Amino acid sequence: MTSRKLPMPEAVIFDMDGTLFETDTLLVRVHERVFDTLREEKLYMEPTPPVEKLLGCLGMLLEDIWRNVMPDGTEEARKRADDLLLQYELEGLEAGEGELYPYVEETLRKLKERGIKLFVASNGLEEYVKGVARHKGIEALFDGLYSAGEYKTASKVELVARLLEEHGIRKAWMVGDRSSDVEAGKGNSLQTVACAYASYGRAAELEGADVHISDFRELTGLLA
């Protein structure tokens, strides 16, 4: 538990995958289904890449994910993989698959009780980001769910800048588990909180964050 305190924020902005949502609890099965279908449709005949490759790309924009996961795939295969990924993710969420990290909902409620606005800023697709929040029962806690899929932003720095401007926010924390989250925070002069409990990225990605937490409950302890 860190003893560090951060200035009281008007808002806290969260990444989704690897921060609020333990994505592998949904994505392992989805990953297998995507590549089974691609082979059935004769679009990609190679063996299924390790799911760790996909998990390691979380936080990237979708087109960059597929370039990394199947660099030998055609553009047609990657576009089809986009559609299948979203379809199977939403089906899994509908079926009750996937879990939030421990203590996420109760901690969000405590932050909300302190009068802090809560947002999500994710490089994912709009339907996925909103689907996770809805199916996991936390949608009503947020003042806005921002995604690169909805706003067509080229980076998370740009997405967070839009969020801040639209809501007139000047003091906020950016909370996430990837370098794109640290960059989004620093690029908008925000305090940055790195989630060291996630295992999808590399520890070096979080260098430069103001604070590292190993348990979601530590967020409330950071409040000055």
Image: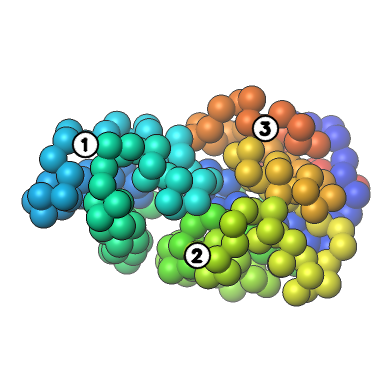
Q: Earlier in the sequence, mark 3 or mark 2?
A: 2
Which one is in front in this view, the residue at disc 1 or the one at disc 3?
A: 1
At numbered mark 3, what does the secondary structure look like: helix, strand or loop? helix
Q: Quadrant of residue 204?
A: top right
Depth check: give the residue in front, 31 or 183. 183
Q: Residues within 10 Å of mark 3 (few under 14, many from 20)?
A: many
- The residue under label 3 is 206
| Identity, as a three-letter code, of the amino acid under mark 3 | Leu
Name the kind of residue labelled 1 in the image.
Thr
Q: Earlier in the sequence, mark 1 or mark 3?
A: 1
Res 114 visible: no
Q: Quadrant of residue 102?
A: top right
First in sequence: mark 1 or mark 2? 1
Residue with the mark numbered 2: 149
- Rate crowding at label 2 as few (under 14), some (14 to 19) or many (20 or more) other CA atoms within 10 Å: some
Q: Identify which amino acid the numbered label 2 is placed on.
A: Gly
Return the residue found at the far front: 75
At numbered mark 2, what does the secondary structure look like: helix, strand or loop? helix
Left or right: residue 52 versus residue 74 is: right
- Is residue 48 visible in this depiction of the protein? yes
Q: Is residue 139 above or below residue 64?
A: below
Residue at image point 79% right, 70% down:
165
Residue 113 percent location from the top left of the image: 76, 65
Q: Nearer the viewer, residue 50 or 115?
A: 50
Residue 48: image tag: 1
- Name the element at disc 1: loop
Going 64% across and 53% down the picture, which residue do you hit?
156
For disc 1, the neighbor class at 10 Å (few under 14, some 14 to 19, many from 20) is some
Q: Please report the residue visible at 80 percent of the width from the left and 53 percent of the height from the top.
A: 188
Tell me where residue 15 appears, x and y as whole percent.
60, 52
Q: CA distance from mark 1 to mark 3?
A: 29 Å
